Image (spheres, coloured by chain):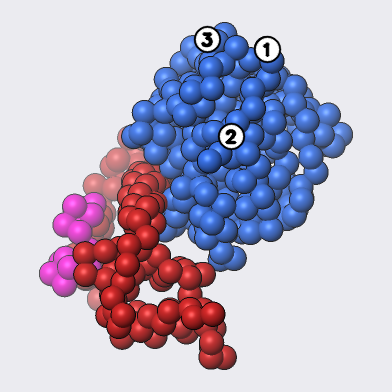
Chain colours: A red, B blue
């Protein structure tokens, strides 16, 4: 049977190795690795020198010394979870503000496209798609930008039509001759 | 050309409406949004901004056809998030006042004059179009608890029909309110804590033409809303 000291050291080294590998593969930000590496080192250290844990437990009046390490680990995990939620809240705030900014930019871009004037298109215009919306599309012909209603004649859905237009990048414009 | 009507005692010059923007947060409101936008434009000559919070039924296009400026959200953030987008648009374009309305036809555009009046005259920074009688007994009870808890002396805490002056809506479009979910307690308490004056004007509210309340959609939703609001009240208490 191997010594529990070796087991603790092994767990600590294993956690540290996994953390280093995650950082190496860009799966974990360096700033988050500090806490996990500290945790691995603490596990290895207290495993190697259990009498240290016993002394601290005695000083703090804990009757069963091994539980001190467990409580300490749980406390650290709870703090870590709290900081993660704080970080998530900050990220959500940033995403919401970014979302607002994009909405304003997109709204203004679309408004300017609509108010670009009626203009005239050549007889056989070759137009570029700017944006595909549910009932109309924004197109660009030369320097002119405008919106036209989209009529789907074949038995396809609007999403399919939009996808085709988006994939081909160009579309044919048929004048509505009555 | 859009025309506008004035109430006899409004004392507001017609050109004033060019400085007002009406902000409508909308999510899947295709049945009503076009009518709501056209109705506002018929009553007052102001800019109408519809913030499309990720609708899948073509609400944005319907609003666009009705003559509104449409600001489409890439990520769905709820009614308050949509209103914040409208506020930031208003701030960018320098509007003197911003009016928020629901897109489901509950609020009457003819009441806009009534709620902008106290804000335009400087009597208040924010005016709420209130109709407390529309609430059920359960909702009245919840409002009573929230009023006691927050110390706010406002009869209609959840009305989305409001007029804000520039200082008020600029403050509300700051990062400080980005994590709020509703346009009620958090917003009202922040306004009060920052020293803004709030007044209520009694207005008529119609039953929803379509859809249902997303906040009060089920008992679980009501419980969640109440719990979140109570925590918010306790955290933001002055």
Give the structural element (helix, strand or loop) at label 3: loop
Chain at tag 2:
B
Give me the C-alpha separation between circle 1 and circle 3: 16 Å
Q: Is residue A67 visible?
A: no
Give the structural element (helix, strand or loop) at label 2: loop
> Residue B66 location, x and y as percent?
57, 52
**Residue range highlighted in magenta:** A19-35
Q: Is residue B151 left or right of residue B24?
A: right
Tag of residue A48? none
Q: Is residue A15 left or right of residue B146?
A: left
Q: Report the magenta stretch's main SS.
A: helix
Write the residue at 34% across / 52% down.
A112
Callout 2: 10 Å neighbours few (<14), some, many (20+)?
A: few
Q: Is residue B95 magenta?
A: no
Write the residue at 73% across / 41% down.
B106
Between discs 1 and 3, the one toward the N terminus: 1
Labels 2 and 3 positioned on one and the same chain: yes
Write the residue at 48% across / 75% down.
A150
Q: Is residue A34 magenta?
A: yes
- Image height of B211 relative to A130, above or below: above
Give me the C-alpha separation between circle 2 and circle 3: 25 Å
Q: Are marks 2 and 1 in contact (CB under 8 Å)?
A: no
Residue annotated with mark 1: B9
Tag of residue B122? 3
Tag of residue B3? 2
Give me the C-alpha separation between circle 2 and circle 1: 18 Å
């Amino acid at each position: 049977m191997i010594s529990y000291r070796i087991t603790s050291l092994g767990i600590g080294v294993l956690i540290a190795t996994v953390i280093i590998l995650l950082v190496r593969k860009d799966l974990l930000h360096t700033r988050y690795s500090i806490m996990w590496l500290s945790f691995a080192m603490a596990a290895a250290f207290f495993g190697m020198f259990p009498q240290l844990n016993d002394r601290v437990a005695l000083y703090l009046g804990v009757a069963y010394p091994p539980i001190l390490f467990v409580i300490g680990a749980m406390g650290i995990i709870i703090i870590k979870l709290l900081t993660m939620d704080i970080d998530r809240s900050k990220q959500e705030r940033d995403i919401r503000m970014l979302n607002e900014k994009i909405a304003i930019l997109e709204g203004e871009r679309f408004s300017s496209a609509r108010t670009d004037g009626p203009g005239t298109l050549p007889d056989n215009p070759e137009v570029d798609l700017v944006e595909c919306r549910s009932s109309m599309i924004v197109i660009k012909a030369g320097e002119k930008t405008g919106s036209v209603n989209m009529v789907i004649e074949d038995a396809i859905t609007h999403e399919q039509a939009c996808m085709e237009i988006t994939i081909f990048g160009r579309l044919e414009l048929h004048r509505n001759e009555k | 050309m859009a025309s506008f009507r004035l109430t006899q005692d409004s004392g507001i010059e017609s050109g004033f409406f060019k400085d007002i923007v009406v902000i409508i947060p909308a999510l899947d409101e295709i049945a009503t949004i076009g009518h709501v936008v056209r109705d506002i434009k018929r009553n007052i000559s102001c800019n109408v901004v519809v913030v499309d919070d990720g609708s899948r039924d073509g609400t944005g296009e319907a609003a666009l056809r009705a003559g509104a400026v449409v600001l489409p959200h890439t990520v769905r953030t709820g009614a308050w998030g949509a209103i914040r987008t409208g506020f930031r648009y208003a701030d960018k374009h320098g509007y003197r006042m911003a009016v928020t309305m629901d897109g489901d036809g509950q609020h009457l555009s003819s009441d806009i004059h009534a709620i902008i009046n106290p804000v335009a005259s400087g009597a208040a920074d924010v005016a709420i179009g209130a109709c407390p009688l529309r609430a059920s007994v359960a909702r009245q009870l919840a409002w009573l608890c929230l009023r006691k808890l927050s110390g706010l002396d406002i009869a209609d805490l959840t009305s989305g029909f409001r007029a804000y002056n520039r200082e008020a809506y600029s403050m509300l479009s700051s990062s400080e309110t980005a994590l709020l979910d509703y346009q009620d307690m958090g917003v009202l308490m922040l306004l009060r804590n920052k020293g803004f004056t709030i007044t209520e004007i009694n207005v008529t509210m119609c039953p929803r033409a379509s859809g249902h309340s997303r906040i009060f959609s089920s008992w679980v939703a009501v419980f969640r809303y109440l719990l979140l609001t109570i925590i918010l009240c306790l955290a933001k208490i002055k």
